Amino acid sequence: MCGIVGYIGSQQAAPILLDGLEKLEYRGYDSAGIAVYDSGEVSMAKSKGRLKVLNEITHGGETMPGTLGIGHTRWATHGSPSDINAHPHFNKEKSIVVVHNGIIENYLKLKKKLEKKGYSFMSETDTEVIAHLLDHYYDGNPLRAVTKIMHRMEGSYALGIIFRDHPDELYAVRKDSPLIVGHTDGGSIIASDVPAVLKYTRDVYFIENEEIVRLKKDSMEFFTVDEEPIEKECVRIEWDVNAAEKGGYEHFMLKEMNEQPKAITDTFSPRIKEGKIVIEELNMSAEEIQDIDKIMIVACGSAYHTGVTSKYVFEGLARIPVEVDLASEFRYRKPILNERTLVVVISQSGETADTLAALRESKKQGARVLGIVNVVGSSIAREADNVMYTWAGPEIAVATTKAYSAQLIALYLLAMKFAYERGQMKDEVLQEMLEDLKALPSQVEMLLNNKSKIQRFANRYLAARDVFFIGRGVDYAISLEGSLKLKEISYIHSEAYAAGELKHGTISLIEEGTLVAAVLTQKELYKKMLSNMVEVSTRGAFVLAVTNEGNTEVERAADYVVYIPETNRYFTNSLAIIPLQLFGYYIAVGRGCDVDKPRNLAKSVTVE
Ligand code: M6R
């Protein structure tokens, strides 16, 4: 959940570190710090709060000379956000300094042992243990010290390490937390994620689990935990550098919402060829697809919501049983899997700890794992048996929008492919659905163009205390996402319910003025939804409805109606989500919230 960077080269390190941290701030923003080696000493600047505070203290890094340094932006796990707990962390002599992303699970045990040996601790963090542990094992050979601590630490870590006595070297190591390294012009750089290095290089190495890298100004060497040298292949990153910039928008979230038509097109167009769905990455023959007897979808947060949608789509179209699980629950419930189960793990970042653990558990049990992933080269992408990328491009705002939309498209394609290959879908139905799919980008664009209407509506509800989202079938799935979008960025309490559930308890919370967002896009559930809307409005609720064009009857049961254009019944989530995203966004903006970096959150959740 934190972001780390490191630089060694011929340029001043501090401004490069701060620049990299700015690109990684989405990973955590409780505090930030940098450490730089210069003239025999390592100096450090760190501070609670956003990166801009650190930028001010160091005048954009100018006050810290030196060409070797490491930096960190934190999402607090052990110890509150404070100057003391901010990284980097030192050993006592200030000769070894460390930044860390991850969690050292056995840190208390290690801490006790170190305390018995006379080490004392300044912070409450698990990371400080690493600095002292390195000190304990360091005998003049940094690589040896690094491998020794790796044998003793349990948990996850991506580390950047400077040894004052080796000022021509920067060490980095990873286990279960992402890390990339690359050469720059006259230097070498490490980072938790690609956007931090794109300005300097497009050629990067993805560090694998338990690999160590020793970077010098003009070289880098890779080692196993047994100090064996290894060869690694460089990967060319094709992203547009501007994709990770705001490009004139007030927020990344607004920019990314507006990028949804492109994300949708880029995700489906390479996979539709001559009227057929071709998912080469799936690497499954028609017989293998027919042989699958269960699909298990596992993910977290919004990615989980796309899984809920796709359960309806898969079961409806392909007539194959689907289970959807929260990744944090999955492996603890002893799931029943075998070689005929297809496990689909969905993740924007490809680094979500619970989803990654679910993937590993599934593979262990012999299931085939397909990853639907946005970040190229991420852990889930590399460990899944097959990976289907969502081509949404870099997503920076903590609240996902375009990656969510691209995930839906990937799942529709997969469900249609399964339906077709299993003989459940006729060719003419496939062609009709493909036409509807191709129409989605312009329909999404049209809904986005209506944003000022939603903004005006949102402005009336800035003081809302509770919001309930209701729907049935796929509209229940979209309610889950609409509710999450609103609460995570506006801090307004909201919940989503399958509309039929209201009467089983929740309706007692409805009172005069409670806002209820009702989604009704499914013809056969339309009448039932109308009844549910009347039930809440007669109890005083103010009802916002999202429904299909032509459903004007809804206006009698709702106070405000947003219409979505006609599409296939299984694709309506892709349209209904747009007004709900805009609603959440404008409420958050109107309430003065930090839309792109909501409190207590981070973009990629790399701890369980
Ligand atoms: O990177 P992932 O897709 O695996 O992330 C999963 C969730 O953490 C993520 O969707 C989260 O719920 C977002 N903040 C939602 O906007």
Image (spheres, rainbow, N blue to C red):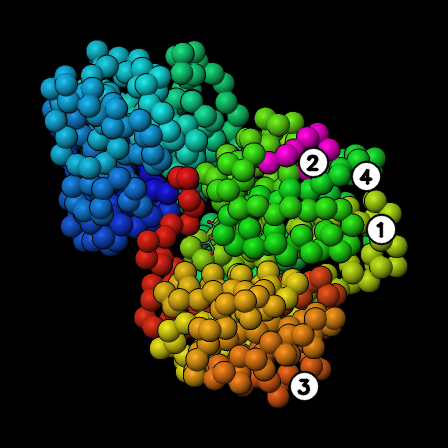
Answer with mark 3 or mark 4, whichever residue precedes in sequence: 4
Answer with mark 4 or mark 1, whichever residue precedes in sequence: 4
Answer with mark 1 or mark 3, whichever residue precedes in sequence: 1
Going by the numbered disc 2, the residue's amino acid type is Thr
Residue receiving disc 1: 424
Answer with mark 3 or mark 2, whichever residue precedes in sequence: 2
Residue receiving disc 4: 290
Bin the neighbour count of mark 3 within 10 Å (Cα to Cα): few under 14, some 14-19, many 20 and up: few
Residue receiving disc 2: 341
Lateral position of residue 419 relative to residue 78, left or right: right
In the rendered image of this protein, does residue 108 appear above or below residue 469? Answer: above
Residue receiving disc 3: 553
Q: Point out residue 132 in the picture as x, y percentages from the top left corner.
A: 20, 23
Tell whether circle 3 marks a residue whose Cβ is less than 8 angstroms from ligand 1: no
Going by the numbered disc 4, the residue's amino acid type is Gln
Which quadrant: the N terminus?
A: top left
Query: Is the Cβ of the residue at disc 3 closer than 8 Å to that at disc 2?
Result: no
Going by the numbered disc 3, the residue's amino acid type is Glu
Query: Is the Cβ of the residue at disc 2 closer than 8 Å to that at disc 1?
Result: no
Which quadrant of the figure has residue 18? top left
